[in-house]
Image (cartoon, rainbow, N blue to C red):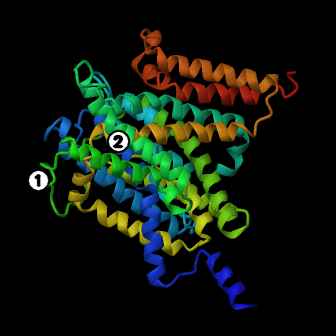
Amino acid sequence: MTDATAAGARLKDPDYMPPIGQAVPLGLQHVLAMFASNVTPAIIVAGAAGFGFGSDQGALGFPDMRYMIQMSMLFAGIATLFQTIGFGPVGARLPIVQGTSFAFLPVMIPAVAGAGTAGMAGLMTGVVLGGIFHFLLGLVIGKIRFALPPLVTGLIVLMIGLSLLEVGIKYAAGGVPLMGKPEFGSLAKWGPALVVIVVTLAIKFTFRGFLSIAAVLIGLIAGYIVAWFMGQVNFANVSKAAIFELPSPFKWGFEINWAIIIGMCLMAVVSAIETVGDVSGITKGGAGREATDREIQGATFADGLGTAVAGIFGGLPNTSFSQNVGLVSMTGVMSRHVVTIGALFLVAAGLVPKVGAVINTVPINVLGGGVIIMFGMVASAGLSMLSEVTWNRRNMVIFATALSLGLGLKLVPESLQHVGKTMQILLTSGLLPAAIIAIVLNLVLPEDLD
């Protein structure tokens, strides 16, 4: 075996540890590739719960939003360690990066937004119990994949992206708290958001490799600089944040809300299937082989456990991050120890509230420019999955029925004003009814419908 062949074999070995001078930059690269996407769901849910956005609401609610940002970093790191180091049956022992999932947002936002909702206590209880359910899926994950072909999974991912686009537009225009005020939708608000979009697209299509993968993060930095020059960035709360803080268990209490619990459990199935795809992508792209049953099962266990532990301390559901799968394929480095180093950086950042405070200075309109791109990419990923579908009459009927009812209920929530509160939360997300309809129709309609 030549030296080049031996070196190539080492790079494909998950247990290989590169020299520390290479491992640290590679680990940081993984953190930068997922950082913006990881903290964004926490900011969105905190905003929906009324915790405030940077300078828009002063100190009101700032500690809670900062805390949620902090937990998104801390438990992304911890969940990643579950995957890369593992223990017992938990963990794939592969370079899988975990992070806060966008997929659960259509369920989480209505759960905390407005009067009469479950609030943070109900949401976090749902996250914990949904995580336990997700963990248990590891026992049967191989047996339920038949019920989720590309027609179903592609529709679900497409619906996730479409259901969140409204959030991105509102944020880019100035945020929900500013609705009805003259500055909402003004050029001053849209300007930095458009800078984020333009810079992101320019980086994405001008460069290759890591810069292309980190295009959204670079766009957010550009928009942030513009917003700072326009006087939209407020650092007043950074000095108030502590240097070090441990997480608090059940910070907002414990409350059973069956609508949220059911929603979290149903979305856990989607998240588990997504993780199966990511594990397969890593082993194929990085090592040129199929994922083993042990790796898929271990990854699912780690997904669920990471989510349940995060929920106890005020974090949101975790899942494997697809952008980091692409990074493994791009670098060709399969070392799980590299990702472990990145996870340790996330854990350290999560224990330092000033990091969360600095992130919280990002104006909501700058964040809006980023999430417009992110949510659009989620929808595009769904379309890519749907491209594998054979579009016969049967599949078109399933897709049309599920999409029409799911998206329709999302757009007209008043149509369900006479059903119970639990059913309203479940059905007006749009995502859950679309998923259930697609799964059921796919199972019951005959293949020879044409």
Residue appearing at x 73%, y 91% in the figure: 2
**Callout 2 environment at 10 Å: few (<14), some (14 to 19), or many (20+)?**
many
Which of the 4 image quadrants contains residue 271? Answer: top right
Q: Which mark sits nearer the N-terminus, 2 or 1?
A: 1
Q: Is residue 117 left or right of residue 319?
A: left
**Callout 1 environment at 10 Å: few (<14), some (14 to 19), or many (20+)?**
few
Q: Is residue 112 left or right of residue 354?
A: right
* Residue identifier under label 1: 240
Task: Work out whether 121 lies above or below 308.
Answer: above
Assign the N terminus to one quadrant of the image.
bottom right
Residue 58, x across and y down, in percent: 14, 39
Discs 2, 1 touching: Cβ within 8 Å: no
Q: Is residue 427 left or right of residue 360?
A: right
Amino acid at the residue labelled 1: Lys
What's the mark number on residue 367?
A: 2
Viewer-nearest residue: 192 or 391 = 192
Residue appearing at x 20%, y 35% in the figure: 56
Residue 159, x across and y down, in percent: 56, 31
Task: Work out whether 379 lies above or below 85.
Answer: above
Q: Secondary structure at mark 2?
A: helix
Amino acid at the residue labelled 2: Leu
Task: Work out whether 68 lies above or below 119.
Answer: below
Residue appearing at x 65%, y 50% in the figure: 141
